[in-house]
Image (cartoon, rainbow, N blue to C red):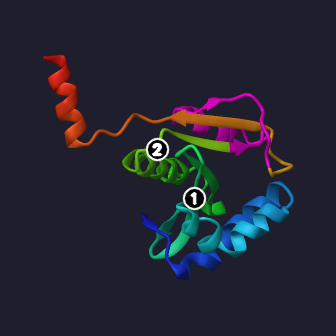
Amino acid sequence: MEIVEFRPEHAEAFRTLNEAWIARHFTIEAKDREVLEDPQGQILAKGGKIFMALDGGRPAGCVALLKMADGGYEVAKMTVAEGLRGSGLGRSLMQRCIDEATRLGAPRLYLETNSGLAPAIALYRAMGFRELEPSDTEYARCDVWMERPLPPRFTGEEEVANDSQLQ
């Protein structure tokens, strides 16, 4: 299993993996359609990222990082193919998000979910997310808001400046 950055040829798999998961648990909403039908314009062109999990070269899962106004990223559209749920692939996708957002210097990761998704919420908590107070959302299904603060990213110059302040 490998996790790679999104390429245009992944667009169909990104859409179908997410549609299958959403339709199984909820109703596909207008905002879902907007993002799933144009991942390039709705995610990547706005400074976001998409990662695809490939099993033998075939898409087996995916996750998106949506750039937020505060410099953080929203974790969205994370799903794993039905036969691979419970395999640890969701954890690997989330870790890739944490690593990438940290590398990019984001202050936090944010996500919206549903209280009926106990395994997903357990994963998020295990990965360092904590629940937030309710806020506005574009999704009718959302009733849980979570975030994970990220460590500050230091460049070599900042480390030198911090070291000199300690002396």
Residue 48, compared with residue 6, is above or below; it is above
- Circle 2 crowding by C-alpha within 10 Å: few under 14, some 14–19, many from 20: many
Q: Is residue 110 left or right of residue 151?
A: right
Q: Position of residue 61 (x, y in %)?
A: 57, 63
Specify the label residue 27 is tagged with: none
Residue drawn at (60%, 77%) of the image: 11
Q: Is residue 4 left or right of residue 89?
A: left
Residue drawn at (74%, 28%) of the image: 133
Residue 140, compared with residue 144, is above or below; it is below
Which secondary structure, mark 1?
A: strand
Looking at the image, is mark 2 or mark 1 earlier in the sequence? Answer: 1
Q: Quadrant of residue 26?
A: bottom right
Residue drawn at (53%, 52%) of the image: 87
Which residue is situated farthest in the left direction here? 167
Which numbered mark, 2 or 1, is in the foreground of this view? Answer: 2
Q: Is residue 94 left or right of residue 161?
A: right
Residue drawn at (73%, 61%) of the image: 21
- Residue stretch in magenta: 112-137
Q: Position of residue 148 (x, y in %)?
A: 54, 35
Residue 83, compared with residue 152, is above or below; it is below
Q: Which image quadrant: the C terminus? A: top left
Which secondary structure, mark 2?
A: loop
Q: Position of residue 88 (x, y in %)?
A: 51, 49
Dot 2 amino acid type: Ala
Residue toward you, 29 or 4:
29
Residue toward you, 126 or 107:
107
Q: CA distance from mark 2 to mark 1?
A: 17 Å
Q: Is residue 129 left or right of residue 160?
A: right
Specify the label residue 63 is tagged with: 1
Residue designated by label 2: 106
- Circle 1 crowding by C-alpha within 10 Å: few under 14, some 14–19, many from 20: many
Q: Which image quadrant: the N terminus? A: bottom left
